[in-house]
Amino acid sequence: MLVDSSVWIPFLRGDRVVEVEILVQALSRSLPVWLAPPILQEVLQGADRPERFAKWDQILGELPLLVEPNPRVAAREAAQLYARCRWQGIKPRSANDCLIAIHAISNEIPLLHNDRDFELIARVEPRLMFLPSN
């Protein structure tokens, strides 16, 4: 599963929400848990001090990173997805969410999230898969 920052941030804060519980179970069972570059950026940029940045970077640094083989194609596909959303009257709050969706779609990996924008994006792009809890 690809885990969005909307789950990693509550996980790192110690919050108890359904999505965090799913993540904890996956980590405890050594199930595949992936990051994508924009997710890593979103989480790390939220650090409120250098020590926390270093700690989060170490924790997330142990996870595999989905890197698109052709970043230009991924950026173009994300931009097109964002535009398709707008054309249908949907405006995701973050263009990064479209890039994250493209990482999940192109790697055929379900996304674990707690962000309503992904549900809206999935109305436009049905190939975006979620874990059953979403």
Image (tube, grey):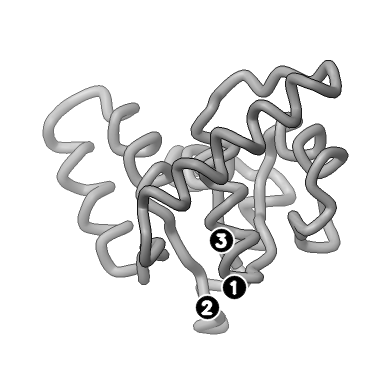
Res 104 → quadrant? bottom right
Q: Position of residue 68 (x, y in %)?
A: 40, 62
Question: Element type at marker 2?
Answer: loop
Q: CA distance from mark 1 to mark 3?
A: 11 Å
Residue 50, how many percent across, how many down? 12, 31
Q: Which of pointers 3 and 2 lies earlier in the amino acid sequence?
A: 3
Q: Specify the amino acid type for callout 2.
A: Pro
Give the total number of marks visible in the rendering. 3
In terms of secondary structure, where does tag 1 sit?
helix
Task: Pinpoint residue 25: horizontal percent, then vertical percent.
Answer: 62, 71
For marks 2 and 1, the one nearer the N-term is 1
Q: CA distance from mark 2 to mark 1?
A: 7 Å
* Residue appearing at x 66%, y 37% in the figure: 81
> 1 or 28, which is in the foreground?
1
Q: State the separation of the CA atoms marked 3 and 2.
A: 9 Å
**Closer to us: 13 or 39:** 39
* Mark 2 vs 1: CB contact within 8 A: yes
- The image quadrant that residue 62 belongs to is bottom left
* Crowd tier of the residue under label 1, counting other residues whose Cα lies within 10 Å: few below 14, some 14–19, many 20 or above: some
Give the amino acid at mark 3.
Leu
Per the image, the residue denoted by label 3 is 2
As helix, strand or loop, the secondary structure at mark 3 comes to: strand
Q: Identify the residue under disc 2.
A: 32
Front residue of this view, candidates 91 and 49: 91
Nearer the observer, 37 or 50: 37
User: Residue 110, labelled with which disc?
Assistant: none
| Crowd around label 2: few <14 · some 14–19 · many ≥20 (10 Å) | few
Residue at 65 percent across and 70 percent down: it is 108
Which residue does the image show at 40% across and 42% down from the upper left? Answer: 38
